[in-house]
Amino acid sequence: FRDVEVRTHIDEVSLAAPVQKLMTQGGSIGTLGMDMVLRLQGGQVQSIKGQTQVDMMSVEGVDLHKTRVSVEGKAGDVTLNTQFKILKVGGASPAAAVLKQVTPNEWWTEGSLEMQTVSGQFHWQNLKAMQWKNVQGTIQKTGKLLTEGSWDDKGLLKGQVQNRDGKNQKKWVIQGDRENPLFMEQVSSTSAVKR
């Protein structure tokens, strides 16, 4: 195969339960649809472009409802633009331990954090370094969680996260690494408190 272009259109498909568990580390994937164009040259992926829709997905205690992802990439650089109607983080999820550091307790209802209208962009470079931009979601109509940042090819983090609820606002600088993120709360322009 020298040059191959693969076009895929799937209106709706459901994956077998063992495949779902493998792809989601024990979770599940609802029905999904896809429009994708993949170009191969010399057996290597040269570009990918398209979009995927998933009605519901559960991964490590995080439920994603009405997910839409557009993807575009060339030679190892991939950009995803994501939208979720609802993103719900269960209290036992590994994500909960991170999010509880930057969200007020009153946003957590019955041990879960539910965000509506979540969107953001994710860009991978050579599938090692990653950058996220304009990631935001609404909580309980008046709350907002926003973040942007990156990790390098060694997994070192840098970025910021903020929450807003009415006139109340808090900001943190993100440091550390992917396995152990650290949040430094910004209490003024000259001092910070570790949280």
Image: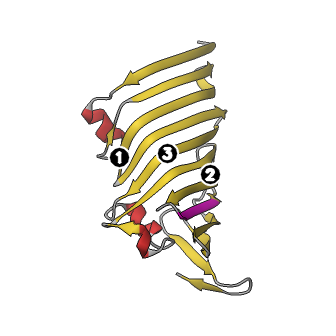
Task: Assign the N terminus to one quadrant of the image.
Answer: top right
Find residue 131 and report its horizontal and vertical position in percent. Answer: 64, 53
Asked whether 43 falls inside the magenta stretch, the response is no
- Write down the quadrant of residue 167 in the picture: bottom right
Residue, x 64% and y 57% (percent of image)? 152
Measured along the vertical axis of the image, is residue 182 above or below residue 115?
below
Kindly report the distance in space between the C-alpha atoms of the residues bearing marks 2 and 1. 25 Å
Amino acid at the residue labelled 1: Ser
Q: Position of residue 55 (x, y in %)?
A: 40, 36
| Mark sitting on residue 84 | 3
Q: Residue furthest left?
A: 17
State the residue at coordinates (35%, 60%).
93
| SS category of the residue bearing label 2 | strand
- Which numbered disc flags the more N-terminal residue, 1 or 3? 1
Q: Which residue is mark 2?
A: 129
Q: Badge 3: how crowded within 10 Å, few (<14), some, or many (20+)?
A: many
In this picture, is 189 found above or below 129? below
Q: Which mark is residue 58?
A: 1
Q: Amino acid at mark 3?
A: Phe
Which quadrant holds residue 82? top right
What's the magenta region? 142-148
Tag 3–tag 2 contact (CB < 8 Å):
no
